Amino acid sequence: MQLISYTQIFRLFLIWMLFVAPLSNAAIDNPLDISGNISLQLRGFTQDALWLDQNTSDAEFSFSSELEIRWRSNDNNQRISFIPFARWDENDKKRSHFDLREAFWAYQSEDIEILLGVNKVFWGVTESAHIIDIINQTDLVESIDQEDKLGQPMLSLAFQKDWGLLDLYLLPYFRERNFSGKNGRFRGQYAINFDNAKYQSSSKRKNLDFAIRYSHFFGGVDLGIYYFDGTSRDPRGVIEADSSDLVLHYDQIEQIGFDIQYTRSSWLWKLESFYRDGYRDAIFGSVAGLEYTFYQVFNGTSDIGVLLEYQYDDRSSSEIATTADNDIFVGSRWTSNNMNDGSFLAGIIVDKKTSESFYSVEAKTRLSENISLALEVKIITNSQIGETSFTQSHDDYIELQINHFF
């Protein structure tokens, strides 16, 4: 029995954010730092829903809140981070959720750091897809671009030496990927059975995953190499014969990969690659590209970058589907580099075989010291039945979000 609903959690969290947290930060004279944001989001959909039971509204509202509490000892050897996040969505109950993005204690000496708790770890250098980013589970209800991540329980050790940085991770608890509910947009044809996930490991969610990563820089080259052994963050969907529900299967995998970025003047050359052994076939995937930046254009403070990347993946149809299999990404980035903190990123990913295309626009600017405005546009075109993104081909949207920071 659920004693408290997500709506009640969000209301309590919002009261804390609006009234308690700012007063606490002002009243406490110690190394504690408290900040956060409250956001109002409006999405407008340009097409009717594709699947039965999906919400038919052309627009939907949601609220989100994130609080950041950070503490560091006077000798700088210890630190604590606590970052809860909550969202309430008017239509999709599965999108209304609460998560601890971070909740950890860390101790650092001259060249060793130990961290215990919930944390987020990012690996990767490319823009269009982060194919080697494997530690954290994707928070798929936040955005279809898979940039948002759930917090991951872990024990990590970091050794910083002259020869580079060595990170070790023990991951004792697995986070299942969250998906839109039956009434939500960004869902497939079949309803997901959220209560009946299957695991290859007999320990299920308590399987002890392990990862090790080495990273270093050599002149203009930044290099990272890693090995992962544990539960795949990407579930396979299997249709139940008796109910036609989609059951998620999480396999055990081994994966090795690397990322490398070479910087020379205004050029960035980027590459991410992985080799995975798991369900049926071994998989090789890679994203390679470049970025060139024009600095201080028109004698101002703005920079404009041009991006080009190629996505490749050789997996068979028996493996988990991916959109990044034989695609070209072209994009451009603009940053204002002034007090407004304005930025604009636009790009298109085109499948070379099918011409299926994914358009993306992301823009943001500050309206005042504590208020910012963000715009996001996602559009899928030329998607046919049987292609990976067809299930969401009617979910094109325009999104406006206003954020208040304190």
Image (spheres, grey):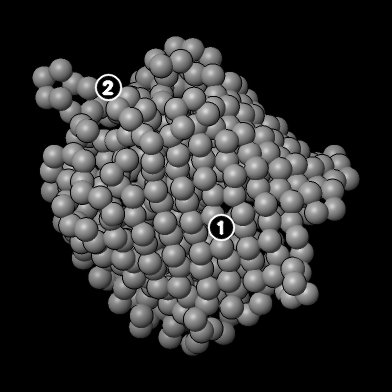
| Residue lying at 20% horizontally and 61% vertically, measured from the top left | 90
Res. 381 in view: yes
Give the secondary structure at mark 1: strand
Q: Is residue 330 left or right of residue 201?
A: right
Q: Which quadrant of the structure image shows residue 57?
A: bottom left
Residue 24's tag is: none
Instruction: Pinpoint residue 297: horizontal percent, then vertical percent.
Output: 74, 68
Instruction: Pinpoint residue 156: horizontal percent, then vertical percent.
Output: 60, 43
Separation (CA) of disc 2 from disc 1: 36 Å
On the image, numbered disc 2 is attached to which residue? 238
Res. 167 in view: no
**Relative vertical location of residue 17 with respect to residue 383 in this rendering, above or below:** below
**Camera-side residue of 216 and 57:** 57
Q: Is residue 30 left or right of residue 269?
A: left
Give the secondary structure at mark 2: strand
Q: Is residue 52 left or right of residue 287?
A: left
Q: Kindly identify the amino acid type of the residue bearing the numbered disc 1.
A: Leu
| Residue lying at 54% horizontally and 49% vertically, measured from the top left | 347
Q: Which quadrant of the structure image shows residue 400?
A: bottom left
**Camera-side residue of 378 and 257:** 378
**Camera-side residue of 58 and 279:** 58
On the image, numbered disc 1 is attached to which residue? 345
